[in-house]
Image (tube, rainbow, N blue to C red):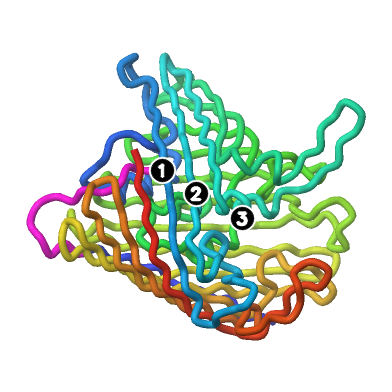
Amino acid sequence: MWTFVVALSVVAQVNLADGGVDEPAPLDGGPQSTQAEDKRLEAANAAALVGGAVTAADAYDLSGYVEAFYQWNFNDPSNGITAWRGFDNRHNTFTVGNAVVDLQWDYENVVGRVALQVGHTPSSYYLAEPGLSGAAGVNASNVELWKYVQQGFVGYRFPVGRGLLVQAGLFLSPIGPEGIAVRDNWNWSRSTLFFALPYYHTGLRASASLTERWAVTLAAYNGWNSVVDNNGEKSFSVQATWAVPEKLALSFLYFGGVERPRGAVEGRAWRHLGDAHVTWFVTKAVALLGHVSGGFEANALGLAAWAGASLSARLEVRKWLFLAVRGDALHERVPSGGSPIFFGLPFVGSGTATVDVRPHPRVSFRLEYRRDQASTPIYFRGQVDGDGQATPWVPSRAAQDTLTLGATTWF
């Protein structure tokens, strides 16, 4: 019997200054909004995917962003690695996290998007991508082939009901409210859940607005983090959303499918994932966010399961100054002899505090302190045993503390 961790993520934003807020553009690009946080959250929802036909004047949108940072890990590991953080993972070095160019089009109900990226974030982003060998006249498929593509899809909006948008290609995962771009989040680093859960899916999805506030998306994918499938089964998801702009947004998602590769000792077990987040804009300046996620896989070795969530808060001191804090936790159960889905530990969590300074509506400087904690040693400290090649690095600490100074700008 295992303990099912249930946590609540609360994000509060309080405006102590008069006037509106200049916020970054949502992940889907386009003009800025004085309430970009609701736009960011809606970008992960089915309602935002449906939209409507646009005129030739704004049919095409070119955008982009750059992220760079310096980080100090107080464990001072000799290998320079801040472990299990995904995208801000290098100690005592200036690093270009990601540089992205994003082209979107929406004209006469024909839609498409190509977002290209380069930096160390894409390599972490694609770490789980299956490596498949090629043959005569057939290329191999692996992380090196795909890591420069963040998104790439095409679609058409059918005149059915309020609009039926059908798209095919490579998409950012709809699971959870956080985005891959730092500008769209309140902290510099992403939560433990974001790092653990899927980043992208490849397949087909259909989104429809049922009413003015309700929308639904049905999708069929290769699976978790796989541009090219590594087994014979497909995965499926359904997401329902309800939103009142600048007031309340709800998202409920189920994702299921066989995710283990061919030949896995766990067999062909179906993995179930449930995810929900709610955002309540109490006033124009105050917002609350809750996010929970969990699932299970009854495989040949037993029951694999997990659950987790985060807790956050944000304070707008001035139009150009924001303070944010976040706590998160993830619990996982792994059957004896099986491979973990995520960390394979009873507990992994973190606490984060961020100062966000915005001297310009499209520039963000962030100073962030974060502490990671695990139930067993998975982090590095001091002189690290191993060489990372012939001999794996040997973790020696169950916690790590970091201070990160980052900057991002976008157009």
Disc nearest the viewer among 3 and 2: 2
Vertical position of residue 90 compared to residue 215: above or below: below
Amino acid on which the number 1 mark rests in the picture:
Tyr
Query: Which mark is drawn over residue 65?
Result: 1
Between the residue at mark 3 and the residue at mark 2, the CA separation in whole angstroms equals: 11 Å
In the image, taking residue 124 as reference, residue 134 lies left or right, namely: right
Query: Is disc 1 placed on a helix, strand or loop?
Result: strand
Give percent across and percent down for residue 323: 27, 68
Q: Tell me if mark 1 has few (under 14), some (14-19) or many (20+) residues whose alpha carbon lies within 10 angstroms of its own.
A: some
Where is mark 3, residue-wise?
A: 124
Vertical position of residue 246 compared to residue 348: above or below: above
**Farthest residue in the left direction?**
18
Give percent across and percent down for residue 237: 60, 45
Segment colored magenta: 14-27
Q: Is residue 376 visible?
A: no
Where is mark 2, residue-wise?
A: 98
